[in-house]
Image (cartoon, rainbow, N blue to C red):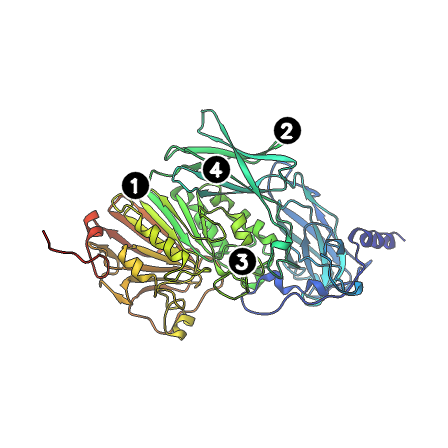
Amino acid sequence: MEQSFQLFAILVILGLTNLGGAAAGGGGFGEQPLSKIAIEKATLNLSCTASINASPLVLGLQGEDTEWVTVKLENHTPTGDDWVGVFSPARFNASMCPPVNAPEEQTPYICTAPIKYKYATDSNANYTKTGKATLKFQLINQRADFSFALFTGGLLNPKLVAVSNFITFSNPKAPVYPRLAQGKSWNEMTVTWTSGYDINEAVPFVEWGIEGQTRMRSGAGTLTFDRSMMCGAPAKTVGWRDPGFIHTSFLKDLWPNIKQFYRMGHRLSNGTIIWSKKYTFRSSPYPGQDSLQRVIMFGDMGKGERDGSNEYSNYQPGALNTTDQIIKDLKNIDIVFHIGDLSYANGYISQWDQFTAQVEPIASTVPYMVGSGNHERDWPDSGSFYDKVDSGGECGVLAETMFYVPAENRAKFWYKTDYGMFRFCIADTEHDWREGSEQYKFIENCLATVDRQKQPWLIFAAHRVLGYSSDYWYGQEGSFEEPMGRESLQRLWQKYKVDIAFYGHVHNYERSCPVYQSQCVTSEKSHYSGTVKGTIHVVVGGAGSHLSDFSQVTPNWSIFRDYDYGFVKMTAFNHTSLLFEYKKSSDGKVYDSFTISRDYTDVLACVHDSCEATTAAS
């Protein structure tokens, strides 16, 4: 009688009444793990002989935004295909589904994918014999409660057999996961974070200042979006999850090179302030300042799961190693550039919170500058330059909202930013860059307006390879570049003497010689000095996602190739000396490097196609 009542109670809580629906997943290498679950095909098969329980009931009692949870399950008819999904909000019933123009019996009763999952056999090899298992999940504060559901039948034909108790963070609305970014001027830092507080219930702000001095408070703007802003499935359907509220505060008129303390706050209507943890950052150097300046560059990192969930799919096997190596060296890093393919959420919106939690130790301490990639932006008929479905229906909305960039229009993800002796021109390959386009004019202006006497190190970066890559697929096309990639831009790189151009998209590492029109302009490979005759092109897309094969042909301009996970660190010692290092994510050691040494007159010197015609007239 008691078991029957428990089943009835679960049915009432979940509202599980309607069965059926269409599959939400498919096959393929490197596929988003959550897309493998045909959640809309799930059927109800609650069993008196199965149970699942989670503990502790309340998380974050000491202000933590990340906690480990123990899930114990029992099933008297276990199979090797049994799996546990983590759902948030905990009530994953049909009331969460958007209205559909279909008969009621065709409406799925589970219309939202779990935020992560594990097989019951994970760390429990005897589960199929004993029917008992204990799983460990790491949860982050995502503005809602959690429940755990036991399914049998595998991912393609899931049958719900048991649902756990609900657990929650002590304050699920708390401000979390700050992301620093350079503002539109060198002495402005922006702080972006996520919370569950709408502006109607709390006023967001940042308290900041120098240790021992009066703290200042800067108000924050608040953005969010709803399901109607998504361009397609799964972002609009099973991948949808309420994003909460994204706040950005602008800390202005910063003194250069000063350590600042800060914390985010929300002032409730009764005057109570909800505080975040405390953080620090160092303000940017004055443009042209002669001091040690260290830059990290990579693309295509994605996210990993420290609890091992979803990892079997080999989706982004290098992501955590890259993250951890950068964290380990953080005291020797000043700014980070992640040039596209950030979270690989691909329309499963819960993954953006998990990505921002993963990079929080980095992004809360140094500016975390991002670029737009195909997995952020591409969607048919959405204004994307590529008519593909790589964003999973996000069509740029998530990236443009979750991260601040100092662009004139964040929907057009190109921008410039200065850091000391560096000028960075960040392009958006998911919009037209060709000569005559709006972006082309921006790129030329960014390159042309830098004062090379003060900022000698001129860097171009974009997601897709607009320069040179001996990727297998580019090799098949015979061009070793993104189609139409460098045809318009190589004239600008040469004219304005761009030092290094960085790209992601191709998941490996490759460095070219200083090159112009597919020809090396020097035979030197490890130390470059004197006149700038060509641009060095670097593919650094091996930060986490599954690796890309090289062409069997090695072009004459390819100096170093590595089929492994890694990232680049650049160190400017002064106006005349730069060190470039490629490090592997597995051990943080340097596997490729070169130096550049030159004087200002070397930048001024004319080389082929870099100067206007001159006259000898007196």
Residue located farthest toward the right when viewing the structure as drawn: 1
| First reached walking from the N terminus: tag 4 or tag 3 | 4
**Where residue 327 is drawn, which disc sits there?**
none
Q: Which residue is mark 3?
A: 344
> If you read the primary sequence from the N terminus, does the residue marked by circle 2 or circle 1 appear first?
2
Residue for badge 1 = 288
Decide which of 88, 404 is in the foreground and name it. 404
**Amino acid type assigned to the residue bearing label 2 in the image:** Thr
Query: For the residues carrying marks 4 and 1, which lies nearer the camera in this image?
Result: 4
Identify the element where label 2 is drawn. Answer: loop
Q: Is residue 72 above or below residue 468?
A: above
Please state which amino acid type lies under the numbered disc 3.
Tyr
Label at residue 250: 4
Report the Cα–Cα distance between label 1 and label 3. Answer: 36 Å
Task: Give the x, y percent position of residue 573.
Answer: 28, 44
Q: Which mark is residue 272?
A: 2
Residue in front for this viewpoint, 36 or 484? 484
The mark nearer the N terminus, 4 or 2, is 4
